[in-house]
Image (spheres, grey):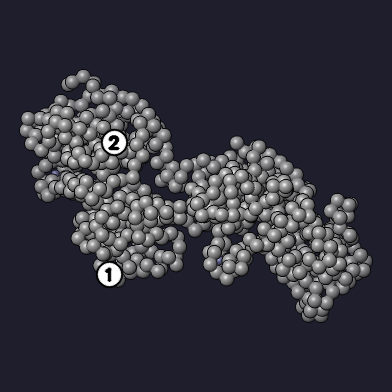
Amino acid sequence: MSSEDCLGWAARDASGHLSPYKFNRRAVGDDDVHVKITHCGVCYADIVWTRNRFGDSKYPVVPGHEIAGIVSKVGSNVKRFNVGDHVGVGTYVNSCRDCEYCDDGLEHQCSQGAVFTFNGVDSDGTITKGGYSNFIVVHERYCFKIPKSYPLASAAPLLCAGITVYSPMIRHKMNEQPGKSLGVIGLGGLGHMAVKFGKAFGLNVTVFSTSISKKDEALNLLGADNFVISSDEDQMKALTKTLDFIIDTASGDHPFDPYMALLKTLGILVVVGAANEIKFSPVSLFFGLKTISGSSVGGTKDIQGMIDLCAEKKIYPKIEVIPIEYANEAIERKIMMNSEGGNEDCLGWAARDASGVLSPYKFSRKAVGNDDVYVKITHCGICYADVVSTRNSFGATNYPVVPGHEIAGIVTKVGSNVQRFNVGDHVGVGTYVNSCRDCQNCNAGLEIQCGKGRVFTYDSVDSDGTITKGGYSTFIVVHHRYCFMIPKSYPLASAAPLLCAGITVYSPMIRHNMNQPGKSLGVIGLGGLGHMAVKFGKAFGLDVTVFSTSISKKDEALNLLGADNFVVSSDQEQMSALAESLDFIIDTASGNHPFDPYMFLLKTCGVLVLVGAPSEIKLSPGSLIGGMRSISGSAAGGTKDTQEMIDLCAEKEIYPNIEVIPIEYANEAFERIINKDVKYRFVIDIENSLK
Ligand SMILES: [Zn+2]
Ligand SMILES: [Zn+2]
Ligand SMILES: [Zn+2]
Ligand SMILES: [Zn+2]
């Protein structure tokens, strides 16, 4: 036994934390090569075994099986290598060298079991230690020559990520049929190599991803021919029976049938990712004689073939070279990428269950795409919808839910295609953050009514398959179309409630031409929505009557908000006195109430617009027929109306009445909203309290 002259970094327990560790390697035997390690790739397998995910980790674990380095000693029988050669070592360092698989150069399938490069039991009984170390001693058979023209740093990831996709591509002859079509699911370490090999083989490559943020990279950096968001059923359907091969590198669970449907007759799907289970309909195989096949790494023959091809065709993995001191952080980043696709650098407050209690929560947002705006959130209004959704009142909430759709803030980054906004602009984001941008309603600026369904700002499935998260958070990334300019003269705190409460009443007022001075408007209810209806009504020169169940609001309605009349809705004399006197009514009441008494207050052809949320609407047909009256609904508003409303509020100095609170007060604010104890909108001071 030699001295402990190998220095590595090892994990000591299931925390997976890596730190320096000295250990022995065996002396160089007659068939061995001593490799001074220059580079080692970080593979997801390193995380699996340093953190004991399979319960079979033998600590201390020195991970690393994407090894590149320089031969510094060779045993007396070694013929293939000389001192000074550049070489690689992959995922296994031993096998029986005698079975039919070993004889065929398929050592990784050895019938005695191949010995893995780390955390494996070698033939001498020792536990193998991987490439996060300064040298390794290995039988020459499991060593591969790297041409000196090929950078060692780039060679490292070929030894696992590269061969894992290359090997099945060769086995299924994807390299012999230029012009055929390949689908690649997932665009991580494996997927991006599959794209590169596919292009080198002359295939037409389509990348499938859950995230639109990878599109630019797939097409322009990696050279894929097509990019498809896997959740987009139209895009998927358009590819039915068009692909010869699919390589599935996705590590998360996902359905297989939609992909099988994309294969031509005799098509093959190869699974190299690590989903927990594979479930698909037999029909997917029967009709079309299709095959689903698995693969893991590759034999020695394929590995050498792949390295030579990469050198010849100048195929290089995309890498980020780091020092060993950064390994723990790199592993954290890799875990994050695998789970959510980015860094968890957004801090929000989320409800975890139907109790609706909000508490701090870290999560990731998508990277800023070419059409996106990154908004540092300064304020977010609290809407009744936030209470409803965090308490799962409709039974459809996806927890954790980060609420908030009355967002105001400052632009801090813009994508390359964005022309409407610059860094430093004050902007708002309202109740939706995406839509098809192509249907009749979208084209008319009525994105909220998008024919394919708009994506709500929180608790909604976005086009990339992620669940949207709202404005109780430090920043948001949003397509510029769903962002609105707030003039710098207008306070951001006051702007927030305009994005839901404001537009919800403004939009139907404009649609029903209520901006005709001298006409009369009734406003039912005097909460967040109602008080804005009064303010807009007065700005339009209307005569405004407020209907409330409580006399206690009279003074405020008349003196603070400037309404012309105040009526207690239960007072039948007051109500009768107003018969057929109103041109319009906006009903913002959220509780159940009778409609007929209000319909009779409308003049002939009068309109009642419902923006509140009673559980049912019941009225006598006579209420509509007699005076040709209408009742009409409305929800939020399109982008055109929203921008106009904000501009009007700035010009006419219309400000919602708000109570600014710190995020720590949000739970209490929810209680007060339920108890109707708010004048008239809570606005969270995100900028100063969420840190
Ligand atoms: Zn064998
Ligand atoms: Zn690996
Ligand atoms: Zn709202
Ligand atoms: Zn649309």
Q: Which residue is mark 2?
A: 40
Between marks 1 and 2 in the image, the one whose residue lies nearer the viewer: 2
Q: Residue at x 13, y 46 (%)?
A: 102
| Depth order, front residue of 419/464 | 419
Q: x, y percentage for residue 139?
A: 14, 35
Give the structural element (helix, strand or loop) at label 1: strand
| Amino acid type assigned to the residue bearing label 1 in the image | Thr
Give the structural element (helix, strand or loop) at label 2: strand
Q: CA distance from mark 1 to mark 2?
A: 41 Å
Left or right of 327 in this view: 547: right
When the figure is inspected, residue 142 is found, relative to residue 282, above or below; the finding is: above
| Amino acid type assigned to the residue bearing label 2 in the image | Cys
Left or right of 11 in this view: 596: right
Residue furthest to the top in view is 3
Q: Tell me: is circle 1 under 8 Å from ligand 2.
A: no
Q: x, y percentage for residue 463?
A: 49, 58
Q: Residue at x 68, y 62 (%)?
A: 641
Q: x, y percentage for residue 589?
A: 76, 60
| Depth order, front residue of 86/78 | 86
Residue 135 picture quarter = top left
Left or right of 46 in this view: 570: right
